[in-house]
Image (spheres, rainbow, N blue to C red):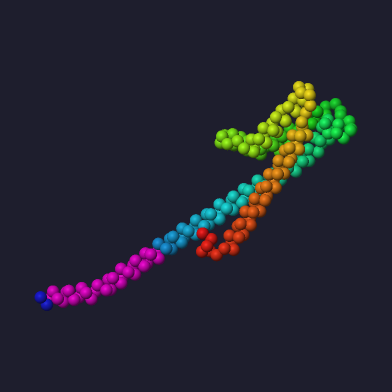
Amino acid sequence: MDKHKHEHSHHHKTSPNHSADHHQHGQHSGHQQQNGNEEGHNHHSRGGHGGHHDHHDHHAHMVGDFKKRFYISLIITIPILILSPMIQMFLGVNWRFAGDMYILFALSSIVFFYGGWPFLAGAKDEVQDKNPGMMTLISLAIIVAYVYSSAAAFGLAKEDFFWELATLIDIMLLGHWIEMRSVMGASKALEELAKLMPTGKRH
């Protein structure tokens, strides 16, 4: 009987220490879990910043591409305007010469395929997605103008619209360049504002 009481008393004396050890083990596991969550969150944040950086670089590349296409097309448009019979008629001059329509056709083809390529590619994507939009409308206009003007250059139609084709592509390139540059500027401003926010409120 005394031996049983002694064992029972010994059990009560060791129980608090056992509970304390269990509590410390739980705290240690909790700290490990918290650190794991923080590391995962930091990794996710780094991945997010990388995604924003890649998106920003892609957008900047597109802005630069539209800018380059606009300036090259604009330079080629100048001789197109000079060689255009309709523009010469407006100016009251006659600068026609043998083979001028073939030169006009070649220059306009460069503007159509090089300057108009973003719109043609965009129209293809819109049609494939069964969601025609602005790119489809622009492409339809420049394709009709190019085909009809090409027929005129080879004597299959009465008059050409090469100068309208070139100026339309120039205006569309300029508009998209300005629009995308403005969007990129607004995106940069939002990123700078996000940097000023406290860390706890950023997420």
- In percent of the image, x 83 and y 27: which residue is there? 99
- In percent of the image, x 81 and y 35: which residue is there? 81
Please give left or right for residue 5 compared with residue 132 in the image. left
Residue 199 at what x, y percent from top left?
Answer: 53, 64
Please give left or right for residue 190 compared with residue 4 in the image. right
Residues drawn in magenta: 3-32
Residue 157 at what x, y percent from top left?
Answer: 76, 23
> Residue 120: in sight, yes or no?
no
Asked if the stretch drawn in magenta spans residue 27, the answer is yes
- In percent of the image, x 78 and y 38: which residue is there? 77
Residue found farthest to the left: 1
Please give left or right for residue 165 compared with residue 47 in the image. right
- In percent of the image, x 60 and y 57: which residue is there? 191
65 vs 143, nearest the viewer: 143
Residue found farthest to the top: 156
Q: Is residue 26 above or below residue 166?
A: below
Residue 82 at what x, y percent from top left?
Answer: 84, 35
For the N terminus, the quadrant is bottom left
Asked if the stretch drawn in magenta spans residue 197, the answer is no
Location of residue 31 by image quarter: bottom left
Residue 34 at what x, y percent from top left?
Answer: 42, 63
